[in-house]
Amino acid sequence: MENFYLIIVVILFALAISDLVVGVSNDAVNFLNSAFGSKAAPKWLVFLMAGIGVLIGSTFSSGMMEVARKGIFHPDMFVFSEIMVIFLAVMITDVIMLDMFNTFGMPTSTTVSIVFELLGSAVAVSVVKIKSMGGSILELSEYINSEKALAIITGILLSVFIAFTVGALIQYITRLIFTFNYRKQMKYFGSIFGGLAITAIVYFILIKGIKGSAFAETMIAGEKIGDWVVHHTGMLLLYSFIFWVLILQLLRWIFNIKILKLIVLVGTFALAMAFAGNDLVNFIGVPLAGFNSFKAWVAGGAASPDEFTMEMLAGKVGTPTFMLAIAGLIMIVTLILSRKAQSVVSTSVDLSRQSEGSERFSSSLAARVIVRGTTKFNRSLSRFIPSPLTRSIQTRFKPVAYDSAGGDGPAFDKLRASVNLVVASILIAIGTSLKLPLSTTYVTFMVAMGTSLSDGAWDRESAVYRVSGVFSVIGGWFLTAILAFTVSGIIASVIMLGGKFMIFVFVAVAIFMVIRTHMFFKKRSQEDSIEDEETITEKDETEKVMEKTIKQVSKSIILANNIYDESITHFLKEKRTKLKDALEVKDSLNKKSKKKKNKVLNTLSKISENVDSGHFYVQLVDYQREMAHSLNFLVEPLYEHLDNHHKPFIEEQAVEFEKLKVEIDQFFNFALSIVKDNKFDEIEDLIKIRDKIVQSLEKMEIAQIKRIKAKTVNTRNSVLFFNTITETKNMLLHGINLMKSHRDFITITRENK
């Protein structure tokens, strides 16, 4: 029996390592988005500062481990075997959930997930235990620490409102003082601003944070460090402010150092430190509690695991510093190597981006209502504010024009990045010092949203999309809570009722889910990588621009041909599943063509100053979009027809479409050879092929009319047949126009070389 539970402890620690990996991938957004979004420093320097912060902060987590052991339930009401089921259910659920959110690039809260997983699994085990003992469900309150759980949940939800409000207010005041042209003011007030910012970080991170660390009990000058800090807080703050003001001013005079850049780097270090101090419990707190439970059970003589009660978890148990340090190192390695972390960071950066560009989220009804209501309120409010004052404030908030939509410039400036980091660090450190497991994701994300709102990043061109994005992320947070509670409860219940074998079943399920999501993410990353290779940037020379354009057009032709061929083939053979695959490829082409069209303004500013060249590029993108539309209106009715189990085309119609497929394939293959070999003089031959196909389509229409008169086909068949013919004509028309636009673009670009 002892060996079995030793295996369970090993599984818990293996899950802890996996949880550290997926957890850091999710929480990297907390301390990287400001540095990456403002491009304050090279990535290696940002990672260095964040890594040092994580390593130091991980040693500050010892006090937070209490939450995982006794914060949600009363451990004395459970026996050893039940406690291990609770912990296993929590870790399995956490690994699956966080990996799923990372895969889709959605930042969620590791704190919320761990709290609701502990709550769900503890409730499930309690209910099973109560029922087996013949008790009443009303006894559940004796097992669950509902007061503490409610306080934690309330604190997390309250942090969302506080973080957004404080972030917006501080950013508004800061921008009002420094404006977007802050360089002049920084010459005079930069050292004071930096001194205040870094002093705040020092106070809340190093001073307040140390109270929960493993070093708080160390003696200095006859008293504990934690007590000494409390007694000398005022003096430390004053000396810290004076020290940093002098240091920053000297660095500016001697080395002309950028103060905001330094603040962003120090803030990244501080926030990474606060993250590790607050969130490490989410990843290793439960396995460590399981390990402590196992040691206590063994020390008690390895009695029956169904009889050994767990009062020991209610007491304070220290966490070895070396374990915290190992966890910190795993987090650092993951931080640097994880591509999923970069995906999650990009979501937060996109939603707080200052400039226009391709929006990741679509508008929603709620967002439209809020934006419309806010706009009307602002108009009403402006009537009561003197016009000179309004104009004066507006001049302070006039942004500096810089390009970021294509990913070449910063998403926002270093002043906002500094406020993001300082405000988030302060709020998180306060929570840590008070032993409240605040959600660092909630705090940092909502601070970033608040500062972007104050900066006017959510203007009328982007507000509905940004608000929709925020709602989507917040909706994901609520989904996290619901899924965490439900899934962990189900796993715990099944293990309790199904026996020990179910433990290994769920571990296998967790491994399978992680592998599957990894493969999905890898596939999507490869697609994004290919798309990035085709994206035109300012660094591209003329030859590179033409090469990328040829790739774009070639890919559109190949995909159009494949989609058309597979759609007709699978429809005629009534293979609904295969046709659905073609539908998904069509959707992918549609999204990519829409994305290119949304980026056309940004691309035009990079390809050439020649108006004609830009004009033909716009046409080129438009015709790619129109081809995608034609395929969309062609494939969807075919799939809907099969999906509803309607009668297929009759044999005569099938023969006509088989011949048409061959002609369409010849058309696209010839078009592809023209693009790749730059044989633009052969476009006239391509037009002749198109005209021949159109004649075939007209003959098919005449044949269909004869079938209608002979009543060999019904109305639904005719509607689908004529729609397919019409969209085929449209696709060919747009295909020729695409070829002409491509020819004109390449010709003009080459002439301007």
Image (spheres, rainbow, N blue to C red):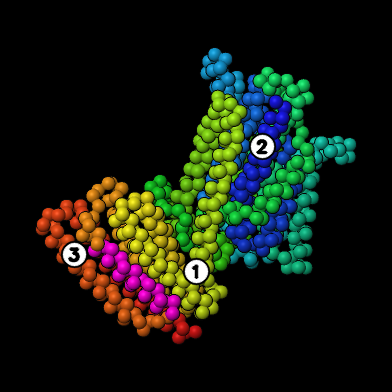
Q: Residue at x 69, y 38 (%)?
A: 13
Nearer to us in this view, 77 or 304: 304
Amino acid type, callout 1 = Glu
Q: Nearer the viewer, mark 3 or mark 1?
A: 3
Amino acid type, callout 2 = Ile
Magenta range: 656-677
Residue denoted by label 2: 11
Residue farthest to the right, as pictured: 222
Quarter occupied by residue 410: bottom right
Vertical placement of residue 536 versus 242, above or below: below
Residue denoted by label 1: 534
The span from disc 3 to disc 1 (Cα, nearest Å) is 40 Å
Q: Position of residue 64 (x, y in %)?
A: 69, 36
Q: Residues within 10 Å of mark 2 (few under 14, many from 20)?
A: some
Q: Could you tell me which secondary element the residue under label 1 belongs to?
A: helix
Q: Residues within 10 Å of mark 3 (few under 14, many from 20)?
A: some
Residue 701's tag is 3
697 magenta-colored: no
Q: Are marks 1 and 2 in contact (CB under 8 Å)?
A: no
Per the picture, the main secondary structure of the magenta-coloured stretch is helix
Q: Residues within 10 Å of mark 1 (few under 14, many from 20)?
A: some
Q: Nearer the viewer, mark 1 or mark 2?
A: 2
Q: Earlier in the sequence, mark 1 or mark 2?
A: 2
Residue farthest to the bottom, as pictured: 751
Q: Are marks 3 and 2 in contact (CB under 8 Å)?
A: no
The answer to whether residue 400 is visible is: no
Q: Could you tell me which secondary element the residue under label 2 belongs to?
A: helix
Q: Earlier in the sequence, mark 3 or mark 1?
A: 1
Amino acid type, callout 3 = Glu
Q: Earlier in the sequence, mark 3 or mark 2?
A: 2
Q: Are marks 3 and 1 in contact (CB under 8 Å)?
A: no
